[in-house]
């Protein structure tokens, strides 16, 4: 089933890039620095890759609308040397297929403000501690879909090369607490908290 979703995701990118003959389009790649609000750790210590494509069109001279299809890695990591209830290591790895939709407002010749929403489908979510991957009886599922609000900036380096810097945060919990359950790594409803830097390359079709 996961392979089917991956194939559909890749077909979506190909379709979007083909459709972008009427629009501007291209490829993007970069890194996420992430944390999960609601666990017992803090700091953007979990890094992940971002890969995908985009299409956009001008609405006015200063405003454009854009859509992306991309693969994004998120999660949480404990880098504290102090144990929590006897546990030192904790890693949450989340792989998403995402479709951000946003508006860009050109505030100058080279800088644009980005505001929008991003829908994500969870391809895989896994957690690890000192003993490796959580066994099935200790696993608590994440929600399949995540919706994030995002804001950021785009910097024009050349006519084809751009750099985006964004922040994104889950609008609804991507995993909710279970009443009566007390775990060393889980404090409250959990939300993705993401800082993202990507390089965008425009392609003429």
Image: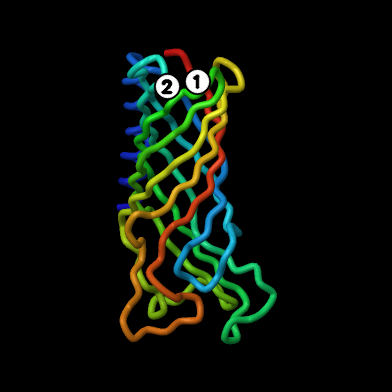
x and y percentages locating residue 78 in the rendered image: 60, 69
Identified at 56% across, 71% down, the residue is 90
What mark, if any, has residue 115 been given in the picture?
none
**Total label count?**
2
Identified at 53% across, 63% down, the residue is 76
Residue 185 lies left or right of residue 136; in this view the side is right
What mark, if any, has residue 202 been given in the picture?
1
The residue positioned farthest toward the front in the image shown: 107
Label 2 with label 1: CB-CB less than 8 Å: yes
Query: In the figure, residue 99 lies in which quadrant?
Result: top left
The residue positioned farthest toward the right in the image shown: 81
200 relative to 31, above or below: above
Identified at 41% across, 50% down, the residue is 96
x and y percentages locating residue 197 in the rendered image: 56, 40
Q: Nearer the viewer, residue 79 or 7?
A: 79
What residue is disc 2 on? 25
In 3D space, how far apart are the residues under numbered discs 2 and 1 (Cα atoms)? 6 Å
Q: In the picture, which quadrant includes the C terminus? A: top left
Identified at 54% across, 67% down, the residue is 91
Q: Earlier in the sequence, mark 2 or mark 1?
A: 2
144 relative to 182, above or below: above
State the scheme by which the image is colored: rainbow
x and y percentages locating residue 92 in the rendered image: 50, 64
Query: In the figure, residue 151 lies in which quadrant?
Result: top left
Report helix, strand or loop for mark 1. Answer: strand
x and y percentages locating residue 116 in the rendered image: 37, 39
How would you rate the neighbour count of disc 1 (Cα within 10 Å): few for under 14, some for 14-19, many for 20 or more?
some
180 relative to 134, above or below: below
Report helix, strand or loop for mark 2. Answer: strand
How would you rate the neighbour count of disc 2 (Cα within 10 Å): few for under 14, some for 14-19, many for 20 or more?
many
């Amino acid at each position: 089933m996961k392979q089917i979703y991956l194939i559909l995701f890749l077909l979506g990118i190909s379709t979007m890039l083909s459709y972008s003959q009427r629009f501007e389009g291209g490829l993007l790649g970069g890194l996420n620095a992430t944390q999960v609000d609601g666990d017992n750790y803090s700091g953007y210590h979990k890094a992940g890759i971002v890969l995908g494509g985009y299409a956009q069109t001008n609405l006015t001279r200063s405003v454009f609308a854009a859509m992306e299809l991309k693969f994004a890695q998120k999660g949480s990591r404990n880098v504290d040397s102090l144990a929590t209830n006897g546990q030192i290591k904790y890693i949450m790895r989340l792989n998403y297929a995402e479709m951000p939709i946003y508006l860009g407002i050109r505030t100058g010749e080279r800088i644009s403000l980005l505001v929008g929403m991003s829908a994500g489908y969870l391809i895989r979510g896994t957690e690890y501690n000192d003993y490796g991957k959580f066994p099935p009886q200790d696993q608590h599922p994440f929600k399949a879909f995540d919706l994030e609000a995002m804001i950021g900036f785009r910097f024009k380096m050349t006519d084809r090369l751009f750099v985006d810097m964004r922040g994104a945060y889950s609008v609804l919990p991507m995993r909710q607490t279970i009443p009566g359950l007390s775990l060393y790594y889980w404090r409250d409803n959990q939300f993705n908290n993401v800082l993202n830097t990507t390089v965008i390359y425009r392609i003429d079709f």
